Image (cartoon, rainbow, N blue to C red):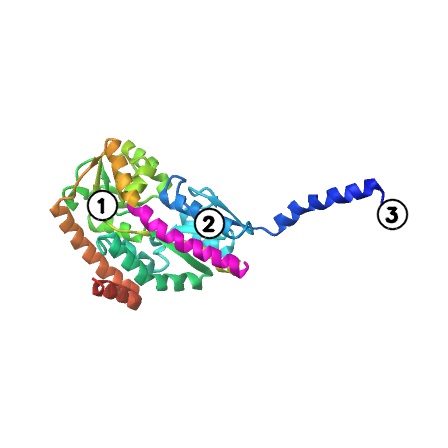
Amino acid sequence: MILSRRAILAAGLAAPALLPRQARAQTTRWQFATPYPDGNFHTRNIRDFITAVEQGSGGRLAIQLHSNGALLPLPQIKRGAQTGQVQLGEILISAYGNEDPLLEVDSIPQLVTSYAGAKKLADLSRPMLEARLARQGLSLLYTVPWPPSGFYTNFPVETLEALRGTKMRTFNVMTNRFATLIGATPTLVQAAEIPQAFATGVVNAMVTSAATGVDSAAWDYAKFFTPIGFTWTKNAVFVNRRALEALPAEVQATIRSAAAAAETRGWAMSEAARDSAQATLGSRGMTVAEPSAALMEGMARVGATMAEEWAGRAGEDGRKIIADLRAAG
C-alpha cells in the first residue's frame, strides 16, 4: 500500500496531537482541603509539600489546594477525606476531640511549656494518633504545632479573674472547658469568622496563637496580647489510605519523603512564626504584655485540673502519655 504525501503528513501530525491526552491520562489528580489562609505558615508549608510531591513524582500526581476553608470548613475536612471528596486534608487535631479524648492531649494548658516539650508530646502521642486515623481509612503524613497561644483582650490581664464574665472565643473541647473553669462564657468560632465575631459582640476575648492573630488582623478588634504559652496545639495532614495505596510504590515513597521534610520544616516555621507574628502585633499598635506571676500561677492550677480530668476521659492511653511525658522530663 502506497500512502499519499497528504496521508503521511496527516499521520505525522496526528501522533503528537495524541500525546497531551495520553500524558493527562497518566496524571492522577488529587484535591487538598485546609481551613487556613494562604499567608499562614501552615499553608505555605503545604505548598512546598505539594511542589516536592509533584516534582518528585515526575508529574504523575497533581494536587490542587483549596485554602481558607474554600472547599470544606474545618469540621468537615476529615470526613471529606474519609469519603474521598478530597484525598488530602489538614485539620487542627484537637478540634475533633469530641470523637476521641486522645485528640485533645495537646490542648491541655501548660502540659508542655516549650517547643522541646511539645516535640516530646508529639512523638509520644503519634502512634496512637496514627492508629485512630488508620481505623477511619486515613494515613497520617505529618504534624506541625501552632506557636504557643496567648490572650487577646481590650484590657490588661494580670490574673485569670480579669477574664471572668467575658465572652471567650473557643475552638475545641478543651478551650471550651478552660473558659468555663475561669468563669467566662465559651463560644465556638472558626478561625475565618473571628473578626466578625468580635465586631458583632459575639465574643470579646480569646486565647489563640500570635499567628492566628495576624491572620485575623487582631489589631482591628483587640488592644492587648498576653503570651502565656497556653498550649502548642498541632495540625495534622493526612491522606485517604485507599487513594495513597492506589499509587505506584515510588510515588507513595515520594509522598512520605515530602511529608517528613514538611514536618521538619513546619516545626522550624512555627518557631519563626511565633517571633515574627508577635512583632507584627506590636508594630500594629497592640500591647504585647509580659504575663504576671499571678497569671501564670492561675494557669498552672487550671492546667493541673484539666490534665486530671482529661486523663480520666482518655483512659489507659491518656494516662500512659502523661506518665511517659513526665518521666522524660
Disc 3: which residue: 2
**Percent position (x, y) of residue 182?**
19, 48
Left or right, residue 297 beside residue 30: left
Q: Is residue 126 above or below residue 17?
A: below
Amino acid tagged 1:
Ala
- Magenta highlight on residue 46: no
Residues packed near mark 3 inside 10 Å, few (<14), some (14 to 19) or many (20 plus): few
For marks 2 and 1, the one nearer the N-term is: 2
Q: Residue at x 15, y 46 (%)?
A: 295
**What residue do we see at 36% from left, 39% from top?**
193
Residue 172: x and y in percent read 32, 51
Q: CA distance from mark 1 to mark 3?
A: 89 Å
- Looking at the figure, which quarter contains the C terminus? bottom left
Find residue 260 and report its image quarter. Answer: bottom left
Judge depth for marks 2 and 1 and give the one in front.
2
Tell me the CA gap for discs 2 and 3.
50 Å
Q: Main secondary structure of the magenta part?
A: helix
Amino acid, disc 2: Ala
Residue 171 in view in this figure: no
Give the camera-side residue of 243 and 49.
49
Residue extending farthest to the left is 294
**Which portion, as a residue range, is magenta?**
247-271
| Mark 2 or 3, nearer chain start | 3
For this rendering, which residue is in front, 255 or 12?
12
- Could you say which quadrant of the image residue 153 lies in? top left
Q: Which mark is residue 184?
A: 1
As shown in the figure, which amino acid type bears the numbered disc 3?
Ile
Q: Residue furthest bottom?
A: 316
Tag 2 residue: 52
Residue 65, numbered label: none
